[in-house]
Image: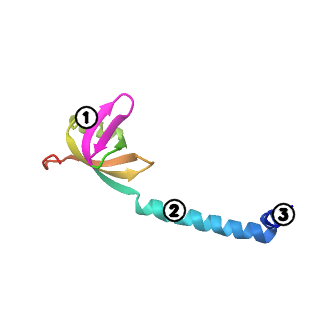
Amino acid sequence: MSRAGADRHSATGRSRLKGSISLLMECRRRERNISRHGTVTGKLRWSPRFDFHVEADGGGYWMLDVPSRMTAEVDALIYTRVIVRGIRIGFADLYLLRIEEDFRPDR
């Protein structure tokens, strides 16, 4: 067994690894909390594949997780420019908190 393998299986090697993993997890937790709330501006769309989503002005798509109480409000805004505020729950997923029509001219 190599010295690296011995260190990895020794008590001191494990405690060092455990400390670095907990530090990494703490950094990721802080990063998630910083970027958790999001605001996206773009065109609201609907498709059978993606359900409600926003084509963002900067490019890309944001899938919307729409609470049932807001479905009628979102339906009324399909194919218009909107400002969406929500909580980021995935890579490109937002849990919808607020949606409003964007009356600014197209960019």
How many callouts does the rendering have?
Answer: 3
Please, what is the three-letter code of the amino acid marked with disc 3? Ser
**Residue, disc 1:** 75
Q: Residues within 10 Å of mark 2 (few under 14, many from 20)?
A: few
Q: Is residue 45 above or below residue 106?
A: above
Q: Residue at x 44, y 49 (%)?
A: 89
Residue 13, given in percent of the width and then of the height, sits at 76, 68
Residue 20, given in percent of the width and then of the height, sits at 64, 68
Residue 45 is covered by the magenta coloring? yes
Q: Residue at x 58, y 62 (%)?
A: 25
Residue 83, given in percent of the width and then of the height, sits at 24, 49
**Residue, disc 2:** 29
The mark that comes first in sequence, 3 or 1, is 3
Q: Residue 93, located in which quarter of the rendered image?
A: top left
Q: Is residue 47 above or below residue 55?
A: above
The mark that comes first in sequence, 2 or 3, is 3
Residue 14, given in percent of the width and then of the height, sits at 75, 66
- Label 1 sits on a secondary structure element that is helix
Q: Residue 18, located in which quarter of the rendered image?
A: bottom right
Q: Is residue 2 above or below residue 48?
A: below
Please provide the residue range marked out in magenta. 41-57
Q: Nearer the viewer, residue 89 or 27?
A: 27
The mark that comes first in sequence, 2 or 1, is 2
